[in-house]
């Protein structure tokens, strides 16, 4: 009988986390899932392969180091740190709601992984740890955003953009920890994730599409680097665990292009909605790139067409009642 391959997924009941758990179970892994208090992980119990003790659900606040350590214990095959607070509304107390849980929560997970002897930690960072960086174009003329780009913290703090701050300080702290203690860490930086929702709640990246379908005029400013199917993100996370020579950061997006071009694609695929279309560049100076995820593609990742991600996301939100009354063209 083959030895059990048990991994831990923090935040495994969220949008990305749920797809990751599904992918891991399908590949024969046993999975410990942490979930934040007052969130519902019950949808995971219906996943194929979840029975016979292979899936274990463990309530654990990111700031509760003993609870995190208990969840990670025995997960020598690896740890996927996905959990990080993200709110649809602006936080009232950024330190308490976003910054502390992201930063200290990451340290707690890394400490737990080191104590458990986990072979690798796959850190789910974000493009929000890469952009906004208004100086990138001036410093790198003609070069598209890539893994060397980091978010400008001063720019974000001055504009009270606290989510990018939280993701950036958490990822930087992880790399510092890895260097100090010799822990094997690989980071994935997904763009706007779309696709069917497994969880009952609406996540922030799906809300970008919902806002667009409702007629929003938000340009996404410096917070856009394309989109990616959530299934591809999960596949990439597992790929990064299973590829021994994988190292560093991996941008996970199906191309970099203007948000206005994404809007045109959505309008073509979803003509029944009254979608606001942009005439000017939505990301001034952004250099487009078709193979922005080349580091992952070189490892074997196959990306799903964004049209499929858009249609599946729209259908899922509609089925779950998140779109409400259609915003029909007049």
Image (cartoon, rainbow, N blue to C red):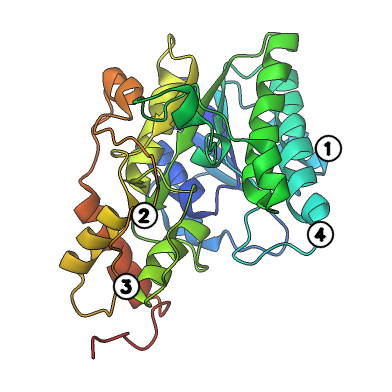
Alpha carbons under labels 2 and 1: distance apart: 34 Å
* Mark 3 secondary-structure assignment: loop
Label for residue 276?
A: 3
Residue annotated with mark 4: 93
First reached walking from the N terminus: tag 2 or tag 3: 2
Judge from the rendering whether residue 278 lies leftward or rightward of residue 206; answer left or right. left
Looking at the rendered image, the disc whose residue lies closer to the viewer, 4 or 1, is 4
Image location (x, y in percent) of residue 11:
60, 47
The secondary structure type at the circle numbered 2 is strand
> Which image quadrant for residue 110?
top right
Number of residues whose C-alpha sits closer than 10 Å to that of mark 1, classed few (under 14), some (14–19) or many (20 or more): some
Question: Vertical placement of 221 versus 102: above or below?
Answer: below
Q: Earlier in the sequence, mark 1 or mark 3?
A: 1
Residue 108 placement: quadrant: top right
Badge 1 is on which residue?
Answer: 66
Instruction: Please say whether residue 5 is visible from this viewpoint.
Output: no
Label at residue 217: none
Query: Considering only vertical position in the picture, is 76 above or below 125?
Result: above
Q: Nearer the viewer, mark 2 or mark 1?
A: 2
Q: Residue at x 32, y 72 (%)?
A: 276
The disc, 4 or 1, on the residue closer to the chain's N-terminal end is: 1
| Position in image of residue 69 (x %, y %) | 76, 33
What SS does tag 4 mark?
A: loop
Q: Quadrant of the N terminus?
A: top left
How far is mark 4 from mark 1, CA to CA? Answer: 25 Å
Q: Secondary structure at mark 1?
A: helix
Q: Is residue 274 left or right of residue 238?
A: left
Q: Which residue is mark 2?
A: 194
Q: Give how far apart the Cα atoms at labels 2 and 3 are.
A: 19 Å
Which callout, 4 or 2, points at the residue further toward the start of the chain? 4
Foreground label between 3 and 4: 3
């Amino acid at each position: 009988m083959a030895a059990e391959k048990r991994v831990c997924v923090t935040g495994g009941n969220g949008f990305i986390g749920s797809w990751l758990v599904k992918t891991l179970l399908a590949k024969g892994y046993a999975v410990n899932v942490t979930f934040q208090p007052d969130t519902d992980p019950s949808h995971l119990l219906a996943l194929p392969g979840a029975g016979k003790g292979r899936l274990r659900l463990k309530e654990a606040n990111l700031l509760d180091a003993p609870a995190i350590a208990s969840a990670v214990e025995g997960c020598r095959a690896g740890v996927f740190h996905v959990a990080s607070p993200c709110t649809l509304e602006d936080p009232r107390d950024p330190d308490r709601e976003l910054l502390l849980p992201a930063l200290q929560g990451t340290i707690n997970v890394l400490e737990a992984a080191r104590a458990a002897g986990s072979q690798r930690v796959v850190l789910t960072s974000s493009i929000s740890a890469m952009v906004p960086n208004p100086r990138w174009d001036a410093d790198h003329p003609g070069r598209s955003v890539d893994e060397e780009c980091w978010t400008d913290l001063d720019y974000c703090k001055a504009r009270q953009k606290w989510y990018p701050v939280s993701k950036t300080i958490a990822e930087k702290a992880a790399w510092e920890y890895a260097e100090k203690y010799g822990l094997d860490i690989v980071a994935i930086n997904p763009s706007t994730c779309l696709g069917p929702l497994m969880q009952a709640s609406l996540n922030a990246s799906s809300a970008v599409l919902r806002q667009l379908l409702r007629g929003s005029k938000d340009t996404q400013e410096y917070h856009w680097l394309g989109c990616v199917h959530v299934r591809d993100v999960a596949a990439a996370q597992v790929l990064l665990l299973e590829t021994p020579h994988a190292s560093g950061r991996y941008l996970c997006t199906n191309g970099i292009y203007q948000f206005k071009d994404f809007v045109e694609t959505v309008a073509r695929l979803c003509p029944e909605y009254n979608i606001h279309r942009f005439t000017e560049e939505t990301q001034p100076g952004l250099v487009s790139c078709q193979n922005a995820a080349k580091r992952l593609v070189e490892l074997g990742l196959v990306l799903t067409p964004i049209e499929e991600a858009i249609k599946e996301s729209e259908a899922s939100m509609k089925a779950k009642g998140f779109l409400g009354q259609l915003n029909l063209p007049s």
